[in-house]
């Protein structure tokens, strides 16, 4: 039996379905960038160490370089191209723009997707390594600068724009619980709650 | 219609969000490896696995049979290139970029072949399958300050500067400090890996690249491939960071070779790991500082000697000993930069080359001298403020370091500081504060620009500038708007294209100063033309500027930015952990064009200072000659949780004799920052850490206050 090294898969990205043949070795990141021309998701290290390729997979933050495209079939994939509501920027995008939460911009899509994940995870009550009271009944801790820094630490910014990135995430989090956007709707509250207890 | 009479409010000096900001936050901004090309092929570099020797054989045939493989280029079949020329930087190219020209291997990670295939997966697998046989020779990668073969080397400054009798002044000094400082090998690691796509189009070579200067790269590629520069075009619209690493590198040259051989577009992207041997880096340094002062802390003797390394194929010097030539005078003043050649890749410019490691040693030494003299470290520096260039004798074009210290001390709360070390505790943490001075050269290089007036009242500026994250595109928009006396919304700035004519690179903190000069010159002349009121034809009115003569006419002076750095740290001597709790930098850095982006430049530099002080260190394995952990897990750069509240601000620093008044701010933020942190660690613990980074193991072994 000849083993096939490629498959035709269907990926659901930003609410749209894409059917494409992929080499089984193709990562989700390369599928986005090289097959689908969705180059907003960046390749910084290709080995899960920098966070530049962060996307939301079923609402959860994931580095697309460590995910094979064939394994992403059937999942809801949200990239930086899909977080705005038409011409209306997502509050996180707007805050990055207004507060200069970037310099070269290459880590920015990953930072933005990560920040959207952080705000949702926090709202769902997930603790972090710097959370003082981690009892489930304690509810979400205040989203302090230290909480944001800890939760965003998987996303490197070599330009060192961290001060304004943290300000931007804080502003976006304040701007609302952020349930109006398409991206936010894709995280299941039940799944988040389950995760928080686990 | 003309627009010159419109009432106008200055754009320069007020905060403006980036003109390309929306593209960057939506993912629409395309970086070099993201511009689509029909019929694109993918190249993957194969790097040497030995640190010194000769290529004996390359087993190309099996790889050529793999699916999708189009070609394997190596020293036997690659196009020849010319390396006997002086490039934009005035020196011959680093032969590292002249790939596949011979069978010698001068360091581990040297490019030995390029595999080109239809897809990146095929190219990568084939590159990994390519077997290369070497005749291995013994290598030497061991860097020490006492290497017998070290020699003095001029870089962008003379190697040696000496005045006065050093021994006599040291002997006559009331207080003497003699200490050795070391800094490790550091890597730029811009977030966007180097990437280039090359193709031939209608007889022209076009390269879409990620670089710090299209003019630079186009010149080097034309020289390397013996082409008329007019027949080469390099575009580099968005650049994901550079920090000195994005000049001409192996990937562009390999891509051009493959595109030439295959006659189709070829893209070569470096992997993060490959960047550690192909993108350049900052040499480690060993620095000895000897200071002699009178009882009041006035310097009688100053010696700063630095040793750095370079490769066996190219000379590059990290001129760490140059800092004192600007900062402090002494009756005897000796500074020298030396290098040693080892079997390693060639280092290159990295954010504040010379100043970053040099200021660590010198500013830490000043802090030690202040302690010995019993004088406040800020006061010690104020007592040693020179009234002219200590080595050049030239006047300073603005030097308001004292004002930076005064403002910084006020805002940081320095006056309440108890100078004694090891006294303050917060639970398991020992607390301390430190300070250091900073300076960086403010230069300008000739550039050309065009400004076009359109009939609809808008303007287009074209200049081969590079925005590597500095905000240059936005700054030039504001500069042009003010020069044209129109709102910035009516100005469109296009950059990153060698067809726009020669311009300075984004480097040496000289980019925005140089480009703004050219843009202002063209805009001024255009405004004069429009004032004649003859109307704007459909094709517009274009004015071209060239600043070569104007820059040549600038009176000689010591032109620099200055700054005062402050840091507070917490040290746990049991776990060895060092946390920076807050930082403040106050800078006198000329005219600030865009406060919003300028703050980010200063803060980013200070983050680099944290990273340099506590995290960054590339470890070279003596046995293999290569790195241990050449990636972003093995090489730590500061991340969110490492960076506390950082505040950067500036004071008025106007020079009415300077036609642009901009000094450049990309580098000064890192200068002195690591020293301020190291000085704070001493204040917390009572222990001097003279080797960076201040790792947990070093802190644990050094211990804390005996009390």
Image (cartoon, rainbow, N blue to C red):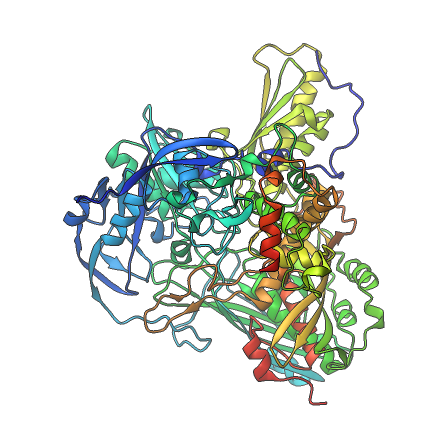
Expressed as whole percent of the image width and height from the top left, the position of residue B324 reads 63, 66
Q: Is residue B657 above or below residue B53?
A: above
Q: Nearer the viewer, residue B706 or B510?
A: B706
Q: Viewer-proximal residue, A50 or A100? A: A50
- Give the quadrant of the C terminus of chain B: bottom right
Closer to us: B515 or B494: B494
Indicate the position of residue B627 as horizontal and vertical percent values.
39, 65
The residue sitting at 72% across, 30% down in the picture is B482
Measured along the vertical axis of the image, is residue B94 above or below residue B161?
above
Q: Is residue B212 left or right of residue B664?
A: left
- Residue, far bottom: B707
- The relative height of residue B693 versus residue B600 in the rendered view (above or below) is below
Place residue B50 in its image quadrant.
bottom left
Rendered location of residue B427, percent (x, y): 74, 78
Q: Is residue B388 visible?
A: no
A158 left or right, relative to B620:
right
Would residue B68 appear left or right of B1 to someone viewing this image?
left
Q: Is residue B308 visible?
A: yes
Location of residue B33 by image quarter:
top left
How many numbered marks, from 0 up? Answer: 0
Quarter-of-image position of residue B277: bottom left
* Quadrant into which the N terminus of chain B falls: top right
The spot of residue B369 in percent (x, y) is: 70, 78
Q: Residue at x 50, y 54 (%)?
A: A50
């Amino acid at each position: 039996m000849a083993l096939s090294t490629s498959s035709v898969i269907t990926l659901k990205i930003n609410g749209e379905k894409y059917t494409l043949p992929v080499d089984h070795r193709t990562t989700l990141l390369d599928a986005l960038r090289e097959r689908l021309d969705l180059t907003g998701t960046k390749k910084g290290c290709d080995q899960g160490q920098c966070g530049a390729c962060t996307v939301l997979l079923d609402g959860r933050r994931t580095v697309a370089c460590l995910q094979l495209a064939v394994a992403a079939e059937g999942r809801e994939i949200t990239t930086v191209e899909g977080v705005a509501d038409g011409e209306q920027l997502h509050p996180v995008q707007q805050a990055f723009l207004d507060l200069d939460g970037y310099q070269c911009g290459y880590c920015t899509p990953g930072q933005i997707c990560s920040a959207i994940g952080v705000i949702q995870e926090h709202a769902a009550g997930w603790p972090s390594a710097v959370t003082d009271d981690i009892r489930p009944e304690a509810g979400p801790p205040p989203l302090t600068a230290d909480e944001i820094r800890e939760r965003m630490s998987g996303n490197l910014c070599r330009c060192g724009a961290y001060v304004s990135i943290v300000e931007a995430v804080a502003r976006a989090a304040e701007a609302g619980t952020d349930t109006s956007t398409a991206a936010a709707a894709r995280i299941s509250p039940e799944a988040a709650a389950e995760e928080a207890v686990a | 219609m003309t627009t010159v009479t419109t009432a106008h409010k200055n754009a320069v000096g007020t905060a403006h969000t980036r003109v390309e900001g929306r593209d960057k936050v939506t993912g629409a901004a395309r970086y070099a490896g993201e511009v689509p090309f029909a019929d694109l092929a993918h190249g993957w570099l194969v790097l040497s696995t030995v640190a010194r020797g000769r290529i004996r054989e390359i087993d190309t045939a099996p790889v050529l049979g793999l699916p999708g493989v189009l070609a394997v280029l190596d020293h036997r079949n690659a196009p020849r290139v010319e390396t006997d020329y002086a490039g934009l930087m005035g020196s011959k190219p680093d032969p590292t970029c002249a790939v596949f020209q011979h069978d010698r291997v001068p360091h581990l990670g040297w490019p030995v072949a390029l595999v080109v295939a239809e897809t990146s997966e095929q190219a990568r697998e084939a590159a990994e399958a390519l077997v290369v046989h070497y005749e291995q020779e013994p290598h030497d990668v061991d860097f020490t300050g006492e290497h017998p073969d070290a020699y003095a080397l001029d870089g962008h400054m003379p190697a040696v500067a000496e005045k006065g009798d050093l021994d006599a002044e040291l002997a006559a000094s009331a207080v003497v400090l003699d200490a050795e400082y070391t800094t490790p090998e550091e890597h730029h690691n811009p977030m966007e890996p180097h990437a280039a796509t090359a193709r031939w189009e209608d007889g022209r070579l076009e390269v879409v690249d990620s670089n710090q200067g299209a003019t630079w790269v186009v010149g080097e590629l034309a020289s390397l491939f013996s082409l008329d520069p007019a027949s080469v075009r390099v575009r580099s619209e968005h650049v994901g960071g550079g920090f000195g690493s994005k000049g001409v590198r192996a990937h562009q040259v390999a891509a051009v070779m493959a595109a030439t051989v295959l006659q189709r577009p070829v893209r070569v992207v470096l992997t993060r790991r490959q960047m550690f041997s192909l993108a350049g880096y900052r040499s480690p340094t060993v620095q000895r500082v000897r200071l002699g002062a009178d009882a009041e802390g006035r310097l009688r003797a100053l010696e700063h000697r630095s040793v750095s390394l370079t490769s066996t194929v190219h000379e590059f010097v990290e001129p760490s000993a140059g800092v004192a030539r600007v900062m402090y005078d002494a009756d005897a003043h000796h500074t020298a930069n030396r290098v040693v050649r080892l079997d390693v890749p060639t280092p290159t410019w990295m954010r504040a080359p010379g100043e970053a490691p040099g200021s660590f040693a010198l500013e830490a030494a000043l802090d030690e001298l202040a302690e010995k003299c019993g004088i406040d470290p800020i006061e010690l520096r104020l007592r040693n403020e020179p009234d002219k260039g200590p080595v050049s004798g030239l006047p300073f074009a603005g030097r308001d370091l004292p004002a930076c210290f005064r403002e910084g001390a006020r805002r940081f709360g320095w006056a309440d500081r108890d100078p004694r070390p090891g006294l303050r505790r917060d639970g398991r943490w020992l607390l301390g504060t430190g300070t250091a001075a900073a300076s960086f050269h403010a230069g300008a290089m000739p550039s050309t620009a065009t400004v076009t007036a359109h009939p609809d009242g808008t303007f287009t500026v074209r200049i081969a500038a590079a925005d590597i994250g500095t905000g240059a595109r936005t700054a030039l928009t504001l500069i042009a708007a003010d020069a044209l006396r129109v709102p910035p919304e009516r100005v469109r700035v296009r950059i990153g294209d060698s067809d726009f004519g020669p311009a300075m690179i984004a480097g040496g903190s000289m980019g925005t100063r140089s480009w703004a000069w050219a843009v202002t010159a063209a805009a001024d002349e255009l405004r004069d033309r429009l004032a004649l009121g003859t109307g704007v034809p459909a094709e517009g009115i274009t004015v071209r500027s060239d600043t070569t003569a104007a820059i040549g006419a600038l009176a000689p002076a010591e032109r620099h930015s200055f700054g005062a750095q402050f840091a507070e740290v917490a040290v746990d001597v049991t776990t060895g952990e060092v946390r920076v709790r807050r930082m403040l930098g106050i800078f006198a850095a000329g005219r600030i064009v865009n406060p919003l982006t300028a703050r980010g430049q200063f803060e980013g530099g200070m983050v680099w200072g944290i990273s340099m002080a506590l995290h960054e260190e590339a470890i070279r394995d003596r046995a293999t000659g290569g790195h241990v952990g050449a990636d972003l897990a093995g090489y730590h750069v500061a991340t969110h949780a490492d960076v506390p509240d950082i505040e950067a601000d500036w004071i008025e620093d106007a020079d009415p004799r300077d036609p642009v008044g901009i000094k450049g701010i990309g580098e000064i933020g890192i200068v002195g920052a690591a020293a301020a942190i190291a000085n704070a660690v001493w204040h917390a613990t009572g222990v001097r850490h003279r080797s960076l980074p201040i790792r947990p193991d070093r802190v644990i072994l050094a211990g804390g206050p005996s009390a």
